[in-house]
Amino acid sequence: MNELNFCGIDVAKRSFVVGISSRKQTKTFTNNPKGIQQAVEYLKNCANLSLVVLESTGGLEIPLAKALHRADFRVVIANPRQTHQFAMAKSLAKTDAKDAKMLASYAKMLVLDDEVEKQLYLPPTPEMEQLEALVLRRTQLVEMRVAEKNRLHQVHDSQRESVQQLIAHFDRLIDELETQINQATAVFDDTLKKFNDIKGIGAITSATLM
């Protein structure tokens, strides 16, 4: 039986480093569509690749994770706190190349400990992506409205009306977004019902928790 391979990928804004358990050298790719496709082809030539692990890096890893999933690789997006604890336990140094190799070791550990299935990455559906974008934008607007409300107590009297107009504008935009969120959540009736059954949780909070 051929030995299994495990892959770790350390993702940064402009590039990412791929480390494979059976290979001493890592390989660096540009973090753009061309580089992602090159990495997918590179990994397709890796025999018996059991699992690919990426760290969660604020969303930088998502395009690569989606491409790997489309290419039928098993992918886990790991919590950085857990991988850091793993590295500390193994006394592994921190560089991009060594991070990639560490993540490959972490992938092997997940497989050996039978911890993979419950952590496998599944990309969101287009409907879920739309809902996430709406909820994120609403959160941003709410934060901007709070900032203007705080500014209202500090601004010169001559500028008070301007701030009030801006707050009213945010009110309208947030109302519009909440209408869109309510419409977008219609396809998630079963999931929403679980949240709505909890006293005090409404549609917007439910969408945020999904």
Image (cartoon, rainbow, N blue to C red):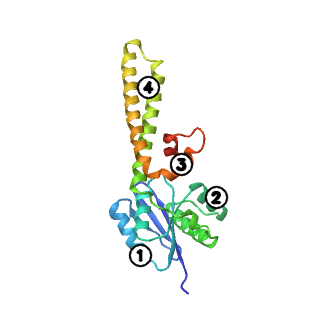
Residue 144 or 95: which is nearer the viewer?
A: 144
Q: CA distance from mark 4 to mark 2?
A: 41 Å
Q: CA distance from mark 4 to mark 3?
A: 35 Å
Q: Which residue position holds label 4?
A: 148
Q: Which residue position holds label 1?
A: 44
Residue 170 or 194: which is nearer the viewer?
A: 194
Instruction: Answer few, some or many: residues within 10 Å of disc 1's Cα (few below 14, many 20 plus, some between 14 and 19).
Output: some
Q: Do tag 4 and tag 2 residues touch (Cβ < 8 Å)?
A: no
Q: Residue at x 55, y 44 (%)?
A: 196
Determine the image quadrant of residue 36: bottom left
Residue lying at the far right of the rendered structure = 89
Q: At numbered mark 4, what does the secondary structure look like: helix, strand or loop?
A: helix
Q: Do tag 1 and tag 2 residues touch (Cβ < 8 Å)?
A: no
Q: Earlier in the sequence, mark 1 or mark 2?
A: 1
Determine the image quadrant of residue 13: bottom left
Instruction: Answer few, some or many: residues within 10 Å of disc 4's Cα (few below 14, many 20 plus, some between 14 and 19).
Output: some
Q: Which residue position holds label 2?
A: 85
Q: Which residue position holds label 3?
A: 193
Three-letter amino acid code at disc 1? Lys
Q: Earlier in the sequence, mark 2 or mark 3?
A: 2
> x and y percent of residue 165 in the render?
36, 22
Q: At numbered mark 2, what does the secondary structure look like: helix, strand or loop?
A: helix
Three-letter amino acid code at disc 3? Lys
Q: Nearer the viewer, mark 4 or mark 3?
A: 3
> x and y percent of residue 97 in the render?
50, 64
Q: CA distance from mark 1 to mark 4?
A: 52 Å
